[in-house]
Image (tube, rainbow, N blue to C red):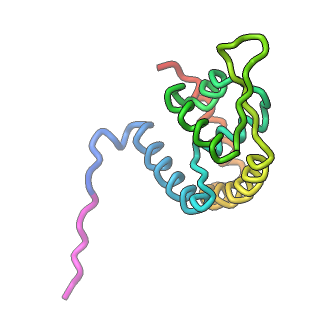
Amino acid sequence: MPVSKKPPVALGGLADTLGFPIRLVQVAIFKDFATELGSLGVTPAIFSVMEVLRANPGITQSKLAATVRLDRSSVVPMLDKLEKRGIVARRASTTDRRHNHLYLTEAGERLLGQAVKRVRAHDKRMSAALSPEERETLIGLLGKLTQAKP
């Protein structure tokens, strides 16, 4: 008996948008990221936060939120969880009581070290279809899109 192939689902106007293919790539990347780093309890957002804290010890919560493009309302509960896990330390500002300065703890540094190794493997896997030049071009183009004003 012949196997019938169903025609692909038509995408309509989605086929001509930037957002839809970027979203599909994001879903694939997040799924692979979860497979690679889920056992560490590290999500893409947590990894981003840890990397920014490593590169900017003492950054304020507001600057952190703006840098990783998360709402302050979602950064605060994430920091609470990371603080309970012993990964992040908050220190009150000595000059402005409205601000906390954030630091990775030693445990946070160790976790980030483990995560970085896995993220490199994840990134290599996810960009395997691209040449090094294409990868660099894509990162540059995506960087331009992040600067676009809505």
Quadrant in the rendering for residue 101: top right
- Find residue 28 and report its horizontal and vertical position in percent: 49, 55
Task: Tell me, yes or no, whether the highlighted magenta stretch contains residue 126.
Answer: no
Q: Determine the residue positioned at 58% across, 42% down.
A: 81
Q: Give the magenta-colored segment's residue range.
A: 1-8
Q: Decide: is 98 above or below 7.
A: above
Give the tally of numbered discs: 0
* Nearest the eye: 65 or 96: 96
* Residue 145 seen: no
Q: Determine the residue positioned at 47% across, 43% down.
A: 22
* Nearest the eye: 81 or 48: 81
Q: Decide: is 19 above or below 2.
A: above
> The N terminus lies in which quarter of the figure?
bottom left
Q: Decide: is 120 above or below 51.
A: below
- Find residue 70 and report its horizontal and vertical position in percent: 54, 30
Residue placed furthest toward the bottom: 1
Quadrant in the rendering for residue 100: top right
* Residue 5 seen: yes
Task: Tell me, yes or no, whether the highlighted magenta stretch contains residue 2.
Answer: yes
For the stretch drawn in magenta, what is the main secondary structure? loop
Relative to 91, 138 lies left or right: left
Relative to 122, 9 lies left or right: left
- Find residue 52 and report its horizontal and vertical position in percent: 71, 35
- Find residue 24 and report its horizontal and vertical position in percent: 44, 49
Q: Determine the residue positioned at 40% across, 42% down.
A: 20
* Nearest the eye: 4 or 116: 116
Quadrant in the rendering for residue 89: top right
